[in-house]
Amino acid sequence: IFILAIESSCDDTAAAVLKNDKILSNIVANQSIHNEYGGVVPELASRAHQQNIVPVIDMALRKANINKDQLDAIAFTQGPGLMGSLLVGSSFAKSLALALDIPLIAVNHMHAHILAHFIDEEGFDKPEFPFLALTISGGHTQIIQVNGFFDMKIIGETTDDAVGEAFDKSAKILGLPYPGGPLIDKYAQLGNPKAFPFTKPKVPGLDFSFSGLKTQILYFVQKNVALNPDFIAENRNDICASIQYTIVQILLDKLKLAVAQTGIHQIAIGGGVSANTGIRQAIKDGEKKYNWKSFIPKFEYTTDNAAMIGIAGYQKFLVHNFENAAVVSKARIEF
Ligand code: ATP
Ligand code: FE
């Protein structure tokens, strides 16, 4: 079967076409407009989605070499996300499903970040149930016990900032442009991770906290810049490496605890921050060090994309989990 998937939850307009669990096309239009504001401006995001959605879907269909009439279903992101952004994707999906008279499938964006592991991709194994998913993105930091395609339980999550925010806010303190996560990653690869020791927060159980680390980094930078105005420029790589190292250690500590508590040794990472080379390496190293089996998705399926919406949609298609046109977008959505 052929599914067209649409993702528009935040600032990327994305469309993908799948043939069963294989990706025929996966198109993403990034919105660079937000960079000059240092964060996503919701009103500008909806407007850009409105401009991008038709050309992005056209391109996805063309690249897949599929005609609209061949489609068997339309999948779209129902939430969580920015309401104005979600509405552009859902309205388009509803109209197209109605016009083509094919099923409409609503997908939870956070489920999709996890289910991206079930895309049929050469050289990538699929996890077996149950497995642990570490979902790390701009808005979320969660450890999830995944018992089935739609049977997932959050066993740990952040009590304040998401890990992506920790990266982006740290980058902002260092004067780097938004989104700073990828830049911290880039400079970290050139620096010494032990140059500046930051302390890890003490949070009970499997939950996370990142706001204290952000404050710690802010004070650290302020103090040193007061002594030496060129401190950041002279130590950029070492500071970035030290920040990244601390964040990776925080994530690893909780994963080790989750493995100990559940007895599950399969670890799958997902979400935009799983593009981070330090995190990827640490999870991979866990195979030898902690006897984990690790699942690291292809780069293009980690940050927001429609292929993951399509694979989640495909699983719903198989069990005929369809919606009618009355389905509503949800900025927050129950897991
Ligand atoms: P959510 O999925 O929770 O709704 P989102 O869609 O905004 O949030 P994603 O697109 O999944 O988030 O991820 C974006 C985040 O990932 C940003 O915070 C960005 O800085 C971070 N990020 C991307 N690449 C890297 C990297 N290599 N290292 C660190 N952080 C990164
Ligand atoms: Fe996301």
Image: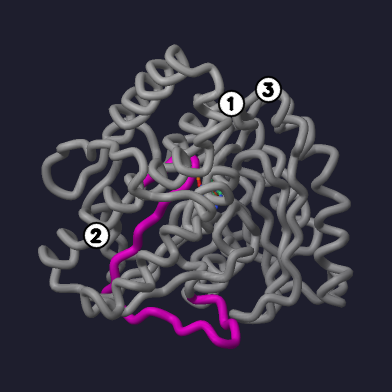
The kind of residue on which mark 2 rests is Leu
In the rendered image, residue 258 lying in the magenta stretch gets the answer no
Residue in front for this viewpoint, 143 or 330: 143
The kind of residue on which mark 3 rests is Tyr
Residue segment shown in magenta: 118-141
Of marks 2 and 1, which one's residue comes earlier in the chain? 1
The N terminus appears in which quarter of the rendering?
Answer: bottom right
* Secondary structure that dominates the magenta span: loop
Give the x, y percent position of residue 147: 28, 70
Eyeballing the image, is 321 above or below 333?
Answer: below
Front of the two marks 3 and 1: 1
User: Is disc 1 surrounded by few (<14), some (14 to 19) or many (20+) residues within 10 Å?
Assistant: few
Tag shown at residue 255? 2
Element carrying mark 3: helix
In the rendered image, residue 122 lying in the magenta stretch gets the answer yes
Q: Distance between the residues labelled 3 and 1?
A: 13 Å
Residue in front for this viewpoint, 301 or 291: 291
The kind of residue on which mark 1 rests is Gly
In this rendering, would 130 be left or right of 214? left
Check whether the beta carbons of the residues at disc 3 and disc 1 lie within 8 A of each other.
no
Furthest toward the bottom, the residue is 122
| Residue sitting at x 42%, y 67% | 281
Element carrying mark 2: helix
Give the x, y percent position of residue 173: 50, 25
Eyeballing the image, is 25 above or below 77?
Answer: below
| Residue sitting at x 59%, y 82% | 121
Of marks 2 and 3, which one's residue comes earlier in the chain? 3
Eyeballing the image, is 215 above or below 251?
Answer: above
Residue for badge 1: 175
Of marks 3 and 1, which one's residue comes earlier in the chain? 3
Residue 193 visible (yes or no)? yes
Residue for badge 3: 37
